Amino acid sequence: MKEFASIEGCLICGKELVYSQSAYKAVCCGCGEKLDTNAACTDGHFICDACHAEEALPVIYYYCTETDSRDPIEIACAIMRHPAIHMHGPENHVLIGSALLAAWYNCGGDIDLPGSLKIMRERGSQLPGGICGLWGNCGAAVSAGIFLSIVTDGTPLNGESRKLSNLLTSECLKKTSEYSGARCCKRDGFFAIETAADFVADNFGVLMELPEDFTCEFYPRNEECLKKNCPFFVA
């Protein structure tokens, strides 16, 4: 496992990340590989997605196999408190769908949870960091769509599953797009989880639990927090 000095901003020095419209080659400070990237810090440090998420992925898997919670927000927040989970980053693309899978299973959903979590890790890890801005497609929303694809045995030829998975992703994206401001993997993740919980209740009768009057505990770590303009901000 790699150890980094910071959990926000640049993992090497904590400084601000700078994004480029065009990808360029840079050497990862974690593994030493020369890879394409759209982001590095103001001092030029670059961490690839694999190194960024390396410590987080086993934490996500282990917690989701052990919890008996029916509340995907509770599951997600418990994982997010672990120091391996950064404020922002591609590990969140696995975390959101995994929390939903665990809650689905604990609500009586008939799935092989360990196997489903491994599929979630495989698919979610293919979503690069920063795609919410660079691709116009938030990874948290896609993660929710992957969750639904898994529990409905989705393939490109399974028409009903394909329809529902894309519909859920689109509803998550619509909710995310209602709020202007810089990316926040926590805010967009909470939106995706709440939207997915409502969606599976309406379409499958699976009643996940959600907290009442939920507020975010992670805002002090986010320099771009919307504060009072975020529905999860502490009043």
Image (spheres, grey):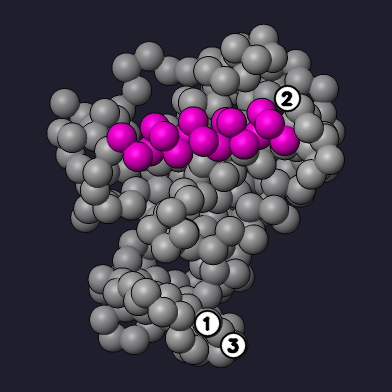
Residue, disc 2:
105
Ranked by sequence position, the earlier of labels 2 and 3 is: 3
Asked whether residue 77 appears in the rendered view, the answer is: no
> Which three-letter amino acid code belongs to the residue tagged 3?
Glu
Q: Quadrant of residue 127?
A: bottom right
- C-alpha gap between disc 2 and disc 1: 37 Å
- How packed mark 2 is, by other alpha carbons closer than 10 Å (few <14, some 14-19, many 20 or more), is many
In the rendered image, the quadrant that contains the C terminus is: top left
Q: Percent position (x, y) of residue 53?
A: 56, 62
Q: Nearer the viewer, residue 30 or 208?
A: 208
Residue pictured at 50% horizontal, 72% vertical: 3
Q: CA distance from mark 3 to mark 1?
A: 10 Å
Q: Quadrant of residue 10?
A: bottom left
Mark 2 vs mark 1: which is more N-terminal? 1
Indicate the secondary structure of the residue bearing disc 3: loop
Whether residue 154 appears in magenta in the rendering, the answer is: no
Name the residue beneath numbered marker 3: 33
Tag 2: amino acid: Tyr
In the rendered view, would you say 49 is above or below 64?
A: below
Can residue 53 be seen here? The reply is yes
Q: Residue at x 46, y 44 (%)?
A: 80
Q: CA distance from mark 2 to mark 3?
A: 38 Å
Other-residue count near label 1 (Cα within 10 Å), few / some / many at <14 / 14–19 / ≥20: some
Q: Whole-percent x and y of residue 195?
A: 49, 26
Q: Amino acid at mark 1?
A: Asp
Residue pointed to by mark 1: 36
